């Protein structure tokens, strides 16, 4: 029996991450000094995936496995379901109802009360499962507090059972940005599928609306789903692709000046915070994190020869001789290095002896207020695997990270996404209702705290 990818991942991560070696950079907790109080705003949510502060003062939430867009009142936790999808498909931890983005003119009486969602659906129900990802626009009806008039903007985007990306955001340029993962290719149950993050479509493929190479990319769409005229030309073609060479970017946020940042899963080390540039190549799978040859080399299982991949047993620690390996330093193409990683390991580090050093980043937001001293212009990223939220202080120009990230809100939970109240004093996080995370001493937590919930962290003003 072939186990689903998410079960294999939990087993693999649990075996390695249960070790708590002192040289594992993930175990060096740089805890922030600020004090916060915590309360549960709402519970019993179906894997709340996206959480966004709305112009109505509500938290807009997508419930990944319940297929609902739900508005949550942060004052009393009351829930108002705006829409329930009847055609979404979910069977594992990387599919279902994913990203949500609000039009900047929502509730401003300008006739553009639009809400955008991204979700997976089965192309041919009853004929086996063929996942696609769809981007859809709804119109919010204030009188009924519901989403109506659905319009599918972009469909036929390839989807799979792992590394789905799916974050959605409207930029200051009025374009829609969507993250896509590499489908978990070359990893666990999907080890024999080739990674396509470096592949780019030809002009003929774009003309034919063949989106099969949109894996491991960040896409940029017009609000009607079409290709913007100023998107970068890559491989001689202009497509929806804005940047490429990504593994699994699950966090996107814009600064007011239009700078786009992303949070991205690494393999066993080197989760990334990236500054996204038009046409930029972020290296995956040839580079993970920095181009430094530390505990990562690209092992291309799909190219195993003479022994075919299908006959091999996948292991991230024991690479068969038939699987070709490529060092990061041998990659000579254009490469955009990350702002910071969680975490790059020291030279000579042993994954077998010291464990993985990932946080499994998901949600990302930008704190701009001055209400919490020293926090202005800080990226906040959620760590699902470590049960913590991290703060990375940006340089004045926003193009670098100053110092090491700080760790906050440590608990036995999986923080999925994050939102910030405009008052600058309240921070909200959504949590998965199951999955692996870590306790205070780096051990695998058997029971999650506050699963399927929205949590509020309030700064304790001195």
Image (cartoon, rainbow, N blue to C red):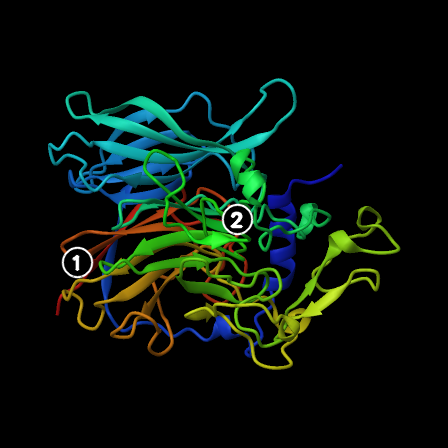
**Sequence-wise, which precedes: disc 2 or disc 1?**
2
State which quadrant residue 366 falls in.
bottom left
Residue 391 image offset from top left, x and y in percent: 33, 66
Q: What residue occupies the far right of the structure in this picture?
A: 306
Residue 435 spot, x, y in % from top left:
52, 47
Q: Is residue 180 left or right of residue 418?
A: right
Relative to 256, residue 28 above or below: below
State whether residue 381 appears in this view.
yes
Label 2 Cα crowd, 10 Å radius (few <14 / some 14-19 / many 20+): many
Say if residue 318 shows up in the picture: no
| Residue name at image x 61 percent, y 57 percent | 14
Quarter of the picture holding the N terminus: top right
Q: Quick one: SS at disc 1?
A: loop
Left/right of residue 440 with respect to residue 75 in the rendered view: right
Which numbered marker is on residue 189? none
| Above or below, 75 relative to 287 | above
Percent coordinates x, y for residue 90 in the rendering: 52, 31
Left or right of 361, for residue 311: right
Query: Residue 425: which disc?
Result: 1
Classify mark 1: residues with Cα within 10 Å, few (<14), some (14-19) or many (20+).
some
Does 190 sit left or right of 205 as displayed?
right
Looking at the image, is 17 positioned above or below residue 405? above
Task: Name the residue beneath numbered marker 2.
Answer: 181
**Mark 2 against mark 1, which lies toward the viewer?**
2
Picture quarter with the C terminus: bottom left
- Residue that extends furthest to the top in the rendered view of this protein: 126
* Distance Cα–Cα, label 2 vs label 1: 33 Å
């Amino acid at each position: 029996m072939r186990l689903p990818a998410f079960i294999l991942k939990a087993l693999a991560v649990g075996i390695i991450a249960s070790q708590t070696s002192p040289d594992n950079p993930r175990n060096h907790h740089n805890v922030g000094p600020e004090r916060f109080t915590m309360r549960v705003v709402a519970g019993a949510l179906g894997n709340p995936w996206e959480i966004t502060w709305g112009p109505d003062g509500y938290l807009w939430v997508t419930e990944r496995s319940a297929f609902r867009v739900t508005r949550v009142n942060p004052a009393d936790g009351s829930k108002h379901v705006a829409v329930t999808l009847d055609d979404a498909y979910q069977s594992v931890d990387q599919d279902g109802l994913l990203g949500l983005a609000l039009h900047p003119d929502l509730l401003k009486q300008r006739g553009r009360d639009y809400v955008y969602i991204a979700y997976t659906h089965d192309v041919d129900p009853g004929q086996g499962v063929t996942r696609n990802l769809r981007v859809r626009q709804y119109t919010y009806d204030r009188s009924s507090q519901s989403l109506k008039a659905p319009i599918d903007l972009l469909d036929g985007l390839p989807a799979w059972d792992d590394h789905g990306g799916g974050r959605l955001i409207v930029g200051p340029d009025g374009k829609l940005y969507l993250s896509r993962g590499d489908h978990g290719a070359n990893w666990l149950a999907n080890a024999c599928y080739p990674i396509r993050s470096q592949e780019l479509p030809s002009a003929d493929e774009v003309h034919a609306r063949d989106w099969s190479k949109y894996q491991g990319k960040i896409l940029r769409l017009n609000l009607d789903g079409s290709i913007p005229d100023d998107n970068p030309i890559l491989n001689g073609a202009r497509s929806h692709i804005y940047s490429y060479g990504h593994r699994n970017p699950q966090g996107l946020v814009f600064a007011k000046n239009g700078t786009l940042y992303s949070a991205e899963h690494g393999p066993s080390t080197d989760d990334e915070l990236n500054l996204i540039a038009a046409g930029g190549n972020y290296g995956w799978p040839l580079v993970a994190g920095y181009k430094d040859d530390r505990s990562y080399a690209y092992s291309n299982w799909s190219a195993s020869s003479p022994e075919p991949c299908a006959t091999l047993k996948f292991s991230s620690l024991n690479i068969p001789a038939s699987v070709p390996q490529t060092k990061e330093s041998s990659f000579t193409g254009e490469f955009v290095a990350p702002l910071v990683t969680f975490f790059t390991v020291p030279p000579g580090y042993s994954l077998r002896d010291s464990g993985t050093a990932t946080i499994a980043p998901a949600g990302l937001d930008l704190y701009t207020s001055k209400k919490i001293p020293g926090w202005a212009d800080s990226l906040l990223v959620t760590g699902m695997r470590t049960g913590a939220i991290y703060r990375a202080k940006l340089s004045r120009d926003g193009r670098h990270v100053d110092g090491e990230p700080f760790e906050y809100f440590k608990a036995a939970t999986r923080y999925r996404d994050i939102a910030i109240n405009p008052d600058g004093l309240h921070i909200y996080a959504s949590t998965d209702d199951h999955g692996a995370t870590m306790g205070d001493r780096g051990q695998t937590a058997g029971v999650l705290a506050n699963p399927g919930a929205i949590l509020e962290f309030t700064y304790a003003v001195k």
